[in-house]
Image (cartoon, rainbow, N blue to C red):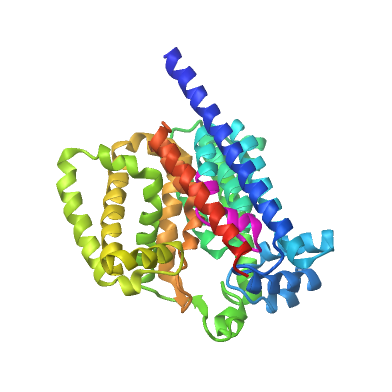
């Protein structure tokens, strides 16, 4: 027993130092990029328009009405605040604002996790986020993921701790209210984070009915939880009232992107399938050891299902392959294999098999999942992220970098089911980290 406690503490310390090292590398790399590269890169050309909009007009009704891009306004207002405070060079100042949000993410998780009941899971969430493709890019360019993750991760940490404590003390209720408010604010940075709200509500309901309560405690706690959830919904409701919808008037009409894209709420039956497949792709580098642990009686049915899914993915590959690093890798590899559809289908076979192995692992560890609000919340967020795509109308494709929204929650699942970080897993994380840096620095040579 004593040995297992020491081993757990050592493991937790290793996670902390790995997360700190990755954070330092990302911040240094992004900081050097900001100081040395002064041309528009990637989506800077579009996003600087909204940063300028909020820098000039403030966070006003007029600024909201003239918002151009698909993501919500708060992330742009965050970077616009940096522009107004620093007041030297708009592009560089906006990038510094984005970089600062990643500093706060790292400090917030590394410090806040120490006071939680499962710090190793939140260190794991930070590790997976920092090595995820586009992470360094989001820290060094004018992108809204940084502010969104600041509110999402700190909000998720606070809310799951509130649910785990299940008491109506003043400090605990304040933690729940702050957590939910942050979750709502994250959805006004990136609307995909609306998935956080039903996930938060679901784990609260589960806690309400799954545990025994002292007399009167249940209703005091449930009243605090309900008020907190209303706080989460408030920023989203205000945004909907300001825009008369969940998307800006410009992106709804298509005027923001020269009529190339438009987006609005609407029924979409194919997008959830695409998103589920891409989530499965990005789960592989983090959960691949689970494939070897799948019980023998489940292997043959899982292989059969994965092969059928791979055949279907290959057949409809032209519709399923979305813009992003995966598409670029498939295009490069197809020069040697001469069939992008076959490569995509084979990749889908492995991804679906890995996803099934993950599902079986969660089922086998059901008691652990049910007893950990952080793990339950992570599962719910990923599922709701897929399901919310049914309501994404319009013509904007699902760029595969959007999967980064699920990265911290993939990290929670990964380190809950696979706590031991061996050489192979560490090597994969190192390779992903290198790829993330390359994806930023390629813009230093391609204006």
For the C terminus, the image quarter is: bottom right
Q: Is residue 84 above or below residue 121?
A: below
Question: Which secondary structure type mostly characterizes the magenta part of the structure?
Answer: helix
At a point 52% along the width and 84% down the height, the residue shown is 260
Nearer to me, 284 or 377: 284
Report which quarter residue 69 is drawn in.
Answer: bottom right
Q: Is residue 258 above or below residue 100?
A: below
Residue 131 part of the magenta-drawn span: yes
At a point 48% along the width and 41% down the height, the residue shown is 374
The number of callouts visible is: 0
Residue 19 percent across, percent down from the top left? 57, 38
Nearer to me, 22 or 353: 22
Residue 337 percent across, percent down from the top left? 28, 65
Residue 299 part of the magenta-drawn span: no
Question: Could you tell whether 364 is left or right of 263 in the image?
Answer: left
Residue 64 percent across, percent down from the top left? 69, 74
Examine the rendering and report whether any part of residue 230 can be seen. Answer: no
Nearer to me, 18 or 378: 18
**Range of magenta residues:** 128-146
Q: Is residue 230 above or below residue 311?
A: above
Residue 131 percent across, percent down from the top left? 52, 47
At a point 69% along the width and 68% down the height, the residue shown is 39
Examine the rendering and report whether any part of residue 289 can be seen. Answer: yes
Question: Could you tell whether 140 is left or right of 16 in the image?
Answer: right
For the N terminus, the image quarter is: top left
Question: Could you tell whether 102 is left or right of 92 in the image?
Answer: left
Report which quarter residue 236 is drawn in.
Answer: bottom right
């Amino acid at each position: 027993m004593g040995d297992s406690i020491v081993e757990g503490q050592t493991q937790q310390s290793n996670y902390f130092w790995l997360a700190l090292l990755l954070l330092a590398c990302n911040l240094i790399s992004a900081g050097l990029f900001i100081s040395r590269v002064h041309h528009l890169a990637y989506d800077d050309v579009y996003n600087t328009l909204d940063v300028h909009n909020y820098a000039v007009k403030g966070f006003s009704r007029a600024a909201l009405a003239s918002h151009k891009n698909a993501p919500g306004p708060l992330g742009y207002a965050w970077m616009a605040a940096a522009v107004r405070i620093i007041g030297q060079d708009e592009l560089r100042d906006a990038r510094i604002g984005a970089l600062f949000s990643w500093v706060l993410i790292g400090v917030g998780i590394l410090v806040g996790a120490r006071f939680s009941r499962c710090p190793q899971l939140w260190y794991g969430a930070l590790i997976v986020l920092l090595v995820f493709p586009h992470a360094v890019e989001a820290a060094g360019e004018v992108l809204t993921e940084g502010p969104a993750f600041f509110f999402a991760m700190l909000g998720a940490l606070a809310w799951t701790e509130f649910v785990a404590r299940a008491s109506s003390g003043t400090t605990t209720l304040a933690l729940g209210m702050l957590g939910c408010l942050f979750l709502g604010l994250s959805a006004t940075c990136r609307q995909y984070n609306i998935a956080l709200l039903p996930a938060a509500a679901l784990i609260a309901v589960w806690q309400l009915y799954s545990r025994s309560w002292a007399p009167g405690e249940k209703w005091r706690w449930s009243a605090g939880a309900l008020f907190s959830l209303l706080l989460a919904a408030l920023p989203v409701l205000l945004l909907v009232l300001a825009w008369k919808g969940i998307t800006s008037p410009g992106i709804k009409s298509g005027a923001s992107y020269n009529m190339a894209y438009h987006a609005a709420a609407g029924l979409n039956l194919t997008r959830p399938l695409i998103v589920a497949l891409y989530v499965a792709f990005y789960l592989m580098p983090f959960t691949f050891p689970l494939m070897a642990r799948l019980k023998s009686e489940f292997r043959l049915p899982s292989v059969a299902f994965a092969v059928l899914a791979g055949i279907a993915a290959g057949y409809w590959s032209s519709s399923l392959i979305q813009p992003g690093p995966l598409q670029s890798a498939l295009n490069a590899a197809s020069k040697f294999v001469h069939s992008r559809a076959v490569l995509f289908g084979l990749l889908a076979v492995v991804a679906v098999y890995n996803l099934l192995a993950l599902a079986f692992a969660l089922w086998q560890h059901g008691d652990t999942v049910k007893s950990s609000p952080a793990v339950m919340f992570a599962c719910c967020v990923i599922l709701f992220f897929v399901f919310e795509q049914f309501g994404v109308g319009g013509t904007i494709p699902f760029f595969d970098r959007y999967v980064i929204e699920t990265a911290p929650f993939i990290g929670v699942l990964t380190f809950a089911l696979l706590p031991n970080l061996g050489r192979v897993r560490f090597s994969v994380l190192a390779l992903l980290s290198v790829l993330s840096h390359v994806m930023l620095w390629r813009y230093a040579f391609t204006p």
